[in-house]
Amino acid sequence: MFIDFATIFVKAGRGGNGMVSFRREKYVPKGGPDGGNGGDGGNVIIKANKQLNTLLDFRYKKHYKAGNGENGKSSNKYGKKGEDIIINVPVGTVVRDIDTGNVLADLVQDKQEVIIARGGKGGRGNAEFATPTNQAPRFAEQGKEGEERKIELELKLLADVGLVGFPNAGKSTLISVISAAKPKIADYPFTTLVPNLGIVKVDEFKSFVVADMPGLIEGAHSGKGLGIQFLRHIERTRVLAFLIDCTTENPRENLKILRQEIKLFKKDMLKKPQLVVFTKIDLADEDIMNKIKKIKFTDQNIKAVHYISSVTNKGISELIKSMWKLLK
């Protein structure tokens, strides 16, 4: 199951208390203070792990707590630091503080990590408070509480090319042809309910990642259909490929709606290089082909237009070359 959103509660460890103790040895009846400091509490650390691709685990476990620091001991012995807890998340996870709305981390590289809640400071033992005027302090500090937060985890997939289109526009079929990905394919809308990633090989040493997104519909920017669940995943893509079923009644209007939804979600996304890909040309007659080839595109961010059939492989190699050229 693909889960791309989760809310969890984290608490860092409490610092250990300082010790009140006095040196007691034979022949030293009135030894000085020797109470040690308490250990610091453990931190809560979030770490990106490329082996993970979903936030599913956080559906079942919501609370995470680091270890407490040990109390200080006599003979000036410090308490042991509390054990850190490391929470592994997929690469591409955004960590946000729910109370403030601030982004605490954007983990886009494997093994990248951030301390999300710091452990409390250990209290000082009475040896720390000895002065010439107070040589036998009978008090010590208490350990501090660790930080606690309620945080939001949001996974945004990392891909080079994002396939954007209405339901049943041929996105899943295309990604199954150009990569080893095997998404569910059927002749009805919303077959794809989760993003699929596929690695496209250009040659023996060159490849790129394509993301097949769930079908977009008008009003998606406001949450309609799969809405923002879909749109957040194309934020990180470097190239957008708009797939338009050439047999639809108004291909030009379809493209206009798709680009408008992306603009309303995040305006800067339309500054990315774009491809327009007319699909299912094996089902189109001469009149349809003449009609779509007359469509003119004036936006300078639309770099190329392709006409393909994933069933017959027509135009597929040219499309891959065009994607690679834009990525380079």
Image (spheres, helix red, strand yellow):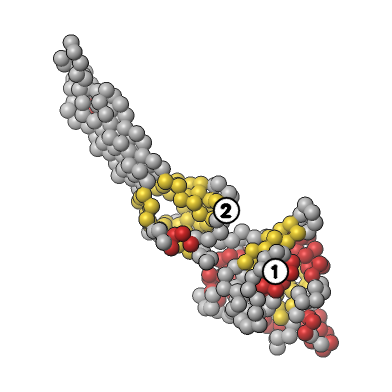
User: Is residue 213 shown to the viewer in this render?
Assistant: yes
Read off the residue under disc 1. Answer: 175
**Residue at 74% in and 66% down:** 178
Could you give the CA–CA distance between mark 2 and mark 1, rounded to whole angstroms? 22 Å
Residue 52: % across, % down: 55, 56
User: Is residue 119 shown to the viewer in this render?
Assistant: no
Can you name the residue that lies furthest to the left here?
29
Q: Nearer the viewer, residue 179 or 105?
A: 179
Q: Is residue 35 left or right of residue 267?
A: left
Q: Secondary structure at mark 2?
A: loop
**Residue at 19% in and 18% down:** 24
Can you name the residue that lies furthest to the top here?
27
Q: Secondary structure at mark 1?
A: helix
**Residue at 77% in and 77% down:** 311
Residue 278 vertical position relative to residue 47 in the rendered view, above or below: below
Q: Quadrant of residue 122?
A: top left
Amino acid type of disc 2? Gln
Q: Quadrant of residue 299?
A: bottom right
Read off the residue under disc 2. Answer: 51
Q: Residues within 10 Å of mark 2 (few under 14, many from 20)?
A: few
Q: Residues within 10 Å of mark 1 (few under 14, many from 20)?
A: many
Identify the mark nearer the N-term, 2 or 1.
2
Residue 61: % across, % down: 40, 58
**Residue at 45% in and 57% down:** 96
Residue 158: % across, % down: 61, 59
Residue 295 vertical position relative to residue 234 in the rendered view, above or below: below
Residue 323: % across, % down: 75, 63
Amino acid type of disc 1? Ile
Q: Is residue 224 left or right of residue 9?
A: right
Residue 279 vertical position relative to residue 63 in the rendered view, above or below: below
